[in-house]
């Protein structure tokens, strides 16, 4: 505990005690010199280090979209699931960039003819490929945890460029498309990791 803050709190506690003990006529003889206190600023957690979020620098031109409330909520759900899985900010960046590419952070249901096979949810995971049931893969926490489980199985994912790590888990027909979302994903993690 901050020693100035601690001394201030002990001083305030002492005054409160003294006021209670010396209440009444005896209080006139008590030394009630005011204790000087120093205001303590609230400490906010620091934003994650950009070098940790984007260790290899971004690859290629970057895309960016404005997010609505649902997309922000899904971003926060991905971050929460990443923390719950015991993984770091870089894992959240890879996850969010993947979800930006796959669904623009929208929890998509089956899109009929526009759908890629039976892909659904934030990560466009397929029940027929063993990712889980439709109900599971359209749950942001479950789908993120499933993605992270796959990421953990990729040896050295932390040292890979984002697009290679994401592609190794997702096995997309467009493996280089994940890279375009790295900056926005890093910005989102920096903004929401400690919120």
Image: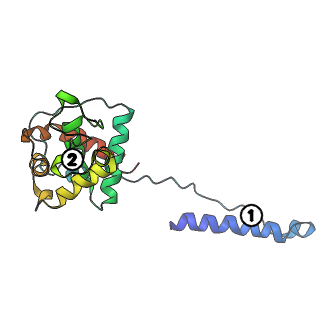
Coordinates of residue 96 in the picture (x, y in percent)? 25, 44
User: Which residue is drawn at the image coordinates 13% and 47% (left, top)?
Assistant: 170
Q: State the SS at label 1.
A: loop
Q: Which residue is mark 1?
A: 33
At x 83%, y 72%, the residue is 21
The Cα atoms of the two marked residues, 1 and 2, are separated by 72 Å
Q: Residue at x 18, y 48 (%)?
A: 54
User: Mark 2 sits on what residue?
Assistant: 127
How many other residues sit within 10 Å of disc 2, few (<14), some (14-19) or many (≥20)?
A: some
Whether residue 48 can be seen here:
no
Q: Is residue 139 left or right of residue 154?
A: right
Among the 4 quarters of the image, the one containing residue 74: top left
Left or right: residue 80 versus residue 37 is left
Is 61 situated above or below 81?
A: above
8 or 108, which lies in front? 108
Tag 1: Cα neighbours inside 10 Å, few (<14), some, or many (≥20)? few
Looking at the picture, how far across and down is residue 140, in whole percent?
Answer: 32, 46
The residue drawn where x is 46% and y is 54% is 43
Tell me where residue 146 appears, x and y as whole percent: 24, 54
Q: Secondary structure at mark 2?
A: helix
């Amino acid at each position: 505990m901050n020693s100035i803050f601690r001394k201030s709190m002990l001083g305030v506690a002492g005054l409160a005690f003294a006021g209670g003990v010396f209440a009444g006529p005896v209080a006139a003889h008590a030394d009630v010199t005011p204790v000087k206190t120093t205001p303590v600023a609230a400490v906010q957690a620091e934003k994650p280090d950009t070098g940790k979020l984007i260790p290899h620098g971004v690859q290629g031109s970057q895309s960016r979209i404005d997010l609505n409330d649902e997309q922000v909520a899904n971003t926060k759900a991905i971050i929460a699931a990443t923390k719950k899985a015991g993984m770091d900010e870089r894992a959240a960046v890879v996850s969010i960039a993947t979800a930006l590419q796959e669904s623009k952070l929208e929890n998509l249901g089956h899109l009929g003819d526009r759908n890629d096979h039976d892909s659904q949810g934030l990560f466009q995971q397929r029940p027929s490929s063993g990712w889980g049931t439709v109900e599971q893969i359209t749950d942001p926490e479950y789908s993120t945890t499933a993605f992270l489980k796959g990421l953990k199985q990729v040896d050295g994912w932390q040292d890979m460029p984002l697009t290679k790590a994401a592609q190794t888990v997702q096995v997309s027909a467009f493996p280089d498309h994940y890279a375009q979302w790295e900056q926005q994903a890093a910005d989102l993690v920096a903004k929401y990791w400690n919120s």
